[in-house]
Amino acid sequence: MAQNQVKIFDSTLRDGAQGQGISFSLEDKIKIVKALDEMQVDYIEAGNPGSNPKDMEFFKRLKDVHLENSSVVAFGSTRKSKINVEGDKNLKDLLSSEASTIVIFGKSWDFQVTDIIKTSLDENLNMIKDTIEYLCKNEREVIFDAEHFYDGYKANKEYAMATLRAAEEAGAQVIVLCDTNGGTLPQEIYDITRTVKTQVSIDVGIHSHDDMGMAVANSIMAVQAGAAQVQGTFIGIGERCGNANLSVIIPILKLKLGYEILNNIELTNLTKTSRYIAEICNMTLADENPFVGNSAFAHKGGMHIDAVTKAPKSYEHIEPELVGNKRRFLVSEVSGKSTILQEIKKVFPNISKDDNSVQKITDRLKELEYEGYQFEGAEGTVELVIRKIIGKYKPFFKLNHFKIIGEQPYGLEEFSSTAVINITVDGKNEMTAAEGEGPVNALDRAIRKALEVFYPELKQARLVDYKVRVLDSENATEAKVRVLIESTDGVESWSTVGVSRDVIQASWIALVDSIEYKLIKDIERKVKAYF
Amino acid sequence: MAQNQVKIFDSTLRDGAQGQGISFSLEDKIKIVKALDEMQVDYIEAGNPGSNPKDMEFFKRLKDVHLENSSVVAFGSTRKSKINVEGDKNLKDLLSSEASTIVIFGKSWDFQVTDIIKTSLDENLNMIKDTIEYLCKNEREVIFDAEHFYDGYKANKEYAMATLRAAEEAGAQVIVLCDTNGGTLPQEIYDITRTVKTQVSIDVGIHSHDDMGMAVANSIMAVQAGAAQVQGTFIGIGERCGNANLSVIIPILKLKLGYEILNNIELTNLTKTSRYIAEICNMTLADENPFVGNSAFAHKGGMHIDAVTKAPKSYEHIEPELVGNKRRFLVSEVSGKSTILQEIKKVFPNISKDDNSVQKITDRLKELEYEGYQFEGAEGTVELVIRKIIGKYKPFFKLNHFKIIGEQPYGLEEFSSTAVINITVDGKNEMTAAEGEGPVNALDRAIRKALEVFYPELKQARLVDYKVRVLDSENATEAKVRVLIESTDGVESWSTVGVSRDVIQASWIALVDSIEYKLIKDIERKVKAYF
């Protein structure tokens, strides 16, 4: 392969699925395959058809999915010891999957051969050889995953190399060195990979694990030592501490090491794709994830914010836009008045930095933060705090009363929730009720129903995200709760936050802010249109 | 310093505090300092007294805190340009803090000097020299943090080295090379650190950031290149993607590289300390954190579980107990019947693996997982599922009815929650009501009140943790919610889980399981005592 080429191999659907809490439906898997294909991933390891009938079903489904860029890969073990390849059910399944590329994993660590699969060192070499020859004869591209390679090499170098030679001679196109236990240091990875590269003539790949927090570094070191394939999972999920995180490795390879693994446009989809895949995995991408996390380019220290405003490279190693992310300035007690001033200017561009409301707003935000509010990612609420202190705010309605009834009725299995609400707008009273999936949903429906009588434009607004964070969980059911709500009206998205010991009260606070923010934005748009 | 010594420098309270969502009270900081001292951290960077009056107050408080192992460090900038050291308020504050060690950070990247702080290259060298001389004259140990060193070295090697020489000549005891933007590759870190080491005679340190997911690897490479101090934050918090994670670096240095940075006993406190510090930071430690995460030694793949049962080193790079963590086997669709059999044997040791209940339990758990349940970390619920299928279960009560009323009353600001409940135990009916901080708390109190009439032993049980996870948040307030409850009775702790679109219903399910689990355990203890 050309010097500046590295192939990206994603195992989200196989190794990734072995991470805690990960469980994919068939539809989930199809979505992930399509997303990976769009990101120009070279190989998608789609499952282990021999060990899991659901995986076999998925391979059949995949034949109807058109992929532009990716090859679908089936994963499986070398034949069982003392069994003929034709008699091995697992290999039969691998072939039935009709995947054009097959990854065969085999033991490269003598201890694993003798103590775990309990066979002889020679038989293991035959298992590798027979299996790969058999699959090559059946016209498959075969990649050999040398399991526990680095531990094996350190324990018994000759044997580890013998397993690679067996695979190469049998026709494997790529040999992937696996740091299966994740315990190998970067320099060791470099040295051993480099040595292997001088002793085989086919491509070498790397498959690292994050047990020492160095899977990304190990993958990079291996590439610098000559590896031409990197195996990992798109957002780093996998057994124990996870696999090498491809959403981190891809931009490093392209932007720092000059590998043309995908073009600039696709790279700008990196953040969006990572978040999309995280959602399918039923996870929230950690804010601090490199490149794609919400906070990867979020600056809080006052000095950092000043510097980045002058020159982004002063505290950013790349421009966030290259990977589809955004710079953010966090409002907090260390961000200083200049950050808060910038937030205020978004609403009131002409405010002077000496205006005494700047200090009042800063104090009020800190006070709320102390109570548990977090304004990072809740710009809707921040704007309302600013407006309320500056005096550019008038309530859109007066809440007279609400009552929520959650009931497990006599004799019935079903739980029901009802909310009753009574409000006043401009002297006119409106009372209504709504049912819901739970108390918060009932309340949400009831307040909208009541307000839409006066503000029909609210019909365009809907909630798209609802998050609950227990702040002091050791207080158990008495704990303070922070609710974060994201809303959209098709034109704009905004987030609001509420805090209380009562999840309904916290949700109410965030809901009201969300509704009032929408109504204010509508007025703003009219002002822009007519004035 | 001796070849096998590396000093650990923690900046949780300074650099860490610049991470999103981090906000420490004075008491929080004291707790963290004591925890770090117990972990034998050499230096604790406690704040920036010159820029923050709360930090100054903290330094004063610290004088009354007795520390066994750690030196308290104050952090601050070189003097401002064109100002005399005696006239620099910040330096005055650094001295008033009475910290015996001071970290001075200065610019080592020519671009930062000219474009950000806007002074001349020579004046910057004077700023470094004057500041450090002044502090040394005042009998402080001075550590010089060369900010942006690696970027500076790559842009203008001579100038970057000149800044280090200025610091060394002025009396600094350690020079710390900072990868402030987090964009330097491991091999570059190694090469540059090695070169610096040959050109200075004082100790060299490393301060890396995680913007490319390589802060740990970069710290390790720097140590291998001769660095004798590693700066980071205990659980990796910090600006943007965070600082180097010391809870990962410490075990690598000790267990993989043989540095005697703390003794074996303290190492076993690593996991506990990380979780403690995470709680103070109001964060949950990610399960997949290396060494200390809940899942660091959690095995899910059936083959992995089989292998680890035979020989832990087959899929673990170290023994979890060394760092105070535990091995776990996850019950899931890929763990196979053998794992579930092990779970069943915890309850019914004599069960045969061919018993048909094994398959039924496996199916039921998968069915519940599909609905959103997660049994990893909810062993209480798993036991109840097992008992219900095997037939070793009888309900402790019958729920006839409950009603929850959450109310924002007319004219009052206060929200109130009341739960009314009606149950039957052995033909006897009990109805009661309770108020609470919110609907779930009200329900929790009501059910306990009702049941304690029949089962007074429930008085010993209390909830210690309550977590809510929104599963499909894009369904907003209609989203499915998973509630995880941890309970204790002083003897044992157990966790239970509930899933529903209604947070009250989900909490109810988890609460009932929690109560019944406790009652079953009490019977078990009596059986052990008398039979």
Image: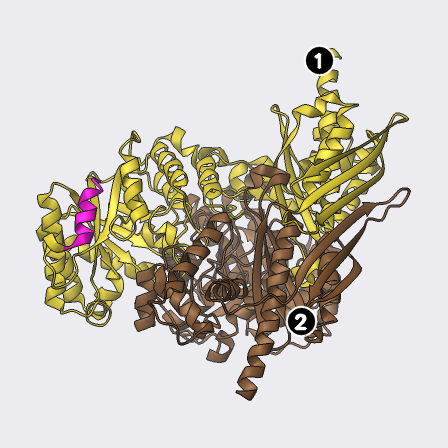
Chain colours: A brown, B yellow
- In the image, what residue type sits under mark 2? Ala
Residue A198 visible in the picture: no
Chain under disc 2: A
Dominant SS type (magenta)? helix
The residue lying at 45 percent from left, 61 percent from top is A295
* Front one among B526 and A133: B526
- In the image, what residue type sits under mark 1? Ala
For mark 2, what is the residue?
A461
Write down the quadrant of residue B507 in the picture.
top right
Residue reaching furthest bottom? A530
Chain under disc 1: B
For mark 1, what is the residue?
B529
x then y, percent, for residue A525: 57, 81
Magenta stretch encompasses residue A405: no
Horizontal side, residue B371 vs residue B123: left or right: right
Give, as a single range, the part of the protein colored magenta.
B88-99
Horizontal side, residue A81 vs residue B212: left or right: right
Q: Residues within 10 Å of mark 1 (few under 14, many from 20)?
A: few
The residue lying at 26 percent from left, 65 percent from top is B151
